[in-house]
Amino acid sequence: MATTRDYERDLYPSDVLGTWNEQDERADDSRPLRRTAKSRVDEWMEVEFKFGGSRIKRKALALVLLGAPAAAPLFFMLPALLTLNENTFSVSVDDTLGTGAEICLFLCLLVTPMVTLTGQRWFVPLRRWYGIMMACCAIGDAIAAGLTDTTFAGGFLGRLAGHAFELMGFMMVMLVIPLLITGNHWAQRKLGRYWKRLHQLIYVIWGLLAAHLLLLEGIGFERGSNGSGFAGDGDAIFHQRLYQYSACSLFLLTLRLPPVKRWIAARQKEGRNWLVYVTIMPIFALFVFGFIFIVNEEIFKGIDSFMEHPSAE
Amino acid sequence: MTSETYARGSQQTSAGGVLVVLISVLSAVLVIAGIFYAAGTSGRHKAALAAAGCEPNLAPSGLQCTTVQMLAGRYAAITTAASQQLNTDGAAYIAGERHHLATATAALTAEVAVETAFGTSLARFPFPPAIASAARALIVADRALARLTGEQARASSLTRMRSFNGRAGAAAAAVETDMRIVQKDLDLRPTASQEP
């Protein structure tokens, strides 16, 4: 007889860049094959519709629509790359690609809690996509900052690891490289059970991001223009990156706690999903609150970068 | 055995329930605090702008701030460049006004170009509302000067050209006066806290 613990472990996937379909799950030989009934939404998403001369699954369209914004940070920097605008890279690549990497990381980490809450799995492929975009943004940020940032001395390496917060960012980039390289089916098959362990590095990256932001903005305390980037903003607290990070992470972390997952699974088993939604709502609202300001930063800085009038806030 | 497992499972799920409720309450408190904090944004924004010496009408919340000094500096850069060029063209006109019609015409044509460009720069300049009327007067005076200088440049003889000198001088003096008024207003802008 399956206990609640067994039920929970079988139902909820782990957080890894490439766990994105049933095939992937089979590659993970450390746990039994997961077979859960598809939700009604999952079934609806599997239905095809006609588009032009071909048939496309609703899921494919939804995934493209939800996944496309993750490429926006790279898109914002494209004009500067094409025109080799060193000034734009120097001034705003950290805000545009760095914030972009943070957004993609949170979206990547958001997939598992959403599966936990909704029981739907159609959006699981997005986890891999967001992970890849996060890696591209982080690596692009590091390379561009190392080459063009004139704020810090010490050459390429000095700019990447010359200060404590930079060192945290550099370590994140170093860790994300193996995840990017192995974020595919072939690597998953080759690495077998070690693949999942390797991809749990995403949690280390999540933690290092906290250290990076903690050290970047005065351990979370506003001093002058520190944090909001501009003292006259009036919303200094909302623009503190560490607070944004904390607001988002609380939801992502809570939904990963085993007791919480067990509680949710038990309520869902009882058919009291409404209770789960009501209880989780404030935590999710806090997530949205923090996330909106990160996205706000990305849009404003990104558009400035795209127009090649970089904002140095 | 089954009831023990059930009891243990029940304890585990209730622990999760307590945890999630506590985190949920904390989150609700933070969200409500955030909403209250957001309600005071406008006041803080003005106070912070005043402290930073920023020009509130030019800096939407969250965007880069333009300080009064920056604004005055940008204005000075435009007026200085225009004045220097007009002085050069004026000197060329004086050198040619008695004997060289072509030289004088060329100098006046250059003056017209500078005055027109100056007017365009002023029209695009983000003057705060309090200075807008003085700035408009300056733009009007500059356009009048450019029109007069244009007519002077089209004169067919040096005598006819020199007959414009008096009116052109008066028009240039009017522009200079308006420029000084705008500069003074920019230097003595009210602080953000005095803004309506």
Image (tube, rainbow, N blue to C red):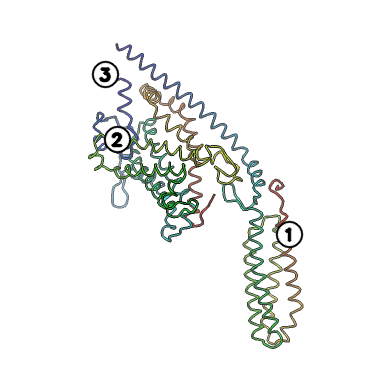
Choose top left, top right, bottom left or bottom right for residue A120.
Answer: top left
Residue A59 vs residue A80, the one in the foreground: A80
Residue B183 percent location from the top left of the image: 71, 61
Give the residue pinned by disc 2.
A196
Callout 3 secondary element: loop
Amino acid beneath label 1: Lys
Q: Tell me: A223 left or right of A126.
A: right
Callout 2 secondary element: helix
Whether A163 is drawn above or below B93: the answer is above
Report, in whole angstroms, how far the alpha carbon at label 1 lies from the one at label 2.
Answer: 69 Å
Q: Which mark is residue B109?
A: none
Residue A72 appears in the rendering = no
Q: Chain of mark 3?
A: A
Residue A223 appears in the rendering = yes
Residue A34 vs residue B84, the one in the foreground: B84
Q: Chain of mark 1?
A: B
Amino acid beneath label 2: Lys
Residue A27 percent location from the top left of the image: 24, 36
Q: Which mark is residue B184?
A: 1
Q: Decide: marks 2, 3 in contact (CB < 8 A)?
A: no
Amino acid beneath label 3: Met
Q: Which mark is residue A1?
A: 3
Whether A236 is drawn above or below A273: the answer is below
Report, in whole angstroms, how far the alpha carbon at label 3 lies from the one at label 1.
Answer: 86 Å
Which residue is rendered at x = 75% and y = 82% of the image? B163
Callout 1 secondary element: helix
